Image (cartoon, grey):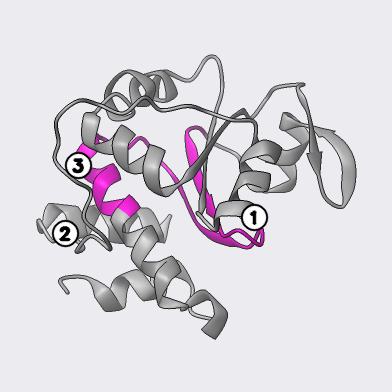
């Protein structure tokens, strides 16, 4: 995927995006609470926070590694808990969710309908359900921090409303 290559190239060059806001001191970790996707979307409408959706599978080793390493990192868990509405979904699961335009569909049907073919896949949505970005890859805490800061900056920039996709925006803003 082109976005993954650009993203990893930016990390390899040690170019970090500036944070949109202060994340506070990195003392005690914040507990990360996962919601069902429909509940996270409802929360996003109320709070205007972007939705972060982690799509995985029970057999996915890299999904388990993200749980054990990336999401347990105090800086990552704090940033996700305070700036995003977080959802986790089994891309092969049968749990039924409310998802427009249908009233109830399984997690697997949602993932299939979104074109998800690999795990883990990280998807970000605005409060209006418009997709901000997605990446299918394991991310360590350093990579995840760069991505989260970039998503927040992209969302705040209004670039999506101007028809500028995340990949193009990210390329233009590397090193700033």
How dense is the environment of label 3, judged by Cα within 10 Å: few (below 14), some, or many (20 and up)?
some
* Left-right relation of 172 to 99: left
Residue furthest out toward the left: 14
- State the CA–CA distance, disc 3 to disc 1: 29 Å
Q: Is residue 30 magenta?
A: no
- Cβ–Cβ below 8 Å for labels 3 and 2? no
Please give the label number shown on residue 45: 1
How dense is the environment of label 2, judged by Cα within 10 Å: few (below 14), some, or many (20 and up)?
some
Q: Earlier in the sequence, mark 3 or mark 1?
A: 1
Residue furthest out toward the top: 59
* Left-right relation of 129 to 80: right
Select label 3 or label 1 by which is in front: 1
Q: Residue at x 52, y 75 (%)?
A: 160
The magenta region covers 119-148
Q: Is residue 123 magenta?
A: yes
Q: Earlier in the sequence, mark 3 or mark 2?
A: 2
Q: Earlier in the sequence, mark 2 or mark 1?
A: 2
**Residue position marked by numbered label 2 in the rendering:** 16
Q: Quadrant of residue 157?
A: bottom left
Task: Give coordinates of residue 167: x percent, y percent.
Answer: 41, 68
**Residue position marked by numbered label 3 in the rendering:** 142
Helix, strand, or loop for circle 3? helix
Q: Residue at x 22, y 37 (%)?
A: 75
Tell me if residue 115 can be seen.
Answer: no
Figure label count: 3
Please give the label number shown on residue 128: none
Task: Give coordinates of residue 60: x percent, y percent.
Answer: 48, 20
Helix, strand, or loop for circle 1? helix
Q: Name the image quarter holding the C terminus.
A: bottom left
């Amino acid at each position: 995927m082109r976005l993954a290559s650009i993203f990893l190239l930016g990390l390899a060059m040690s170019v970090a995006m500036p944070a949109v806001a202060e994340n506070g001191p990195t003392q005690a970790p914040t507990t990360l609470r996962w919601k069902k996707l429909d509940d996270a979307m409802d929360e996003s409408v109320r709070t205007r926070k972007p939705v972060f959706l982690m799509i995985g599978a029970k057999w996915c080793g890299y999904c388990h590694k993200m749980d054990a390493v990336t999401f347990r990192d105090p800086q990552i868990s704090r940033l996700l808990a305070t700036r995003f509405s977080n959802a986790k979904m089994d891309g092969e699961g049968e749990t039924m969710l409310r998802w427009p335009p249908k009233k109830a569909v399984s997690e697997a049907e949602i993932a299939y309908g979104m074109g998800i073919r690999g795990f883990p896949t990280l998807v970000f949505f605005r409060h209006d359900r418009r997709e901000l970005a997605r990446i299918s890859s394991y991310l360590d805490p350093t990579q995840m921090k760069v991505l989260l800061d970039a998503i927040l900056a992209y969302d705040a920039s209004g670039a999506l409303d101007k028809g500028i996709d995340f990949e193009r925006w990210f390329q233009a803003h590397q090193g700033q």
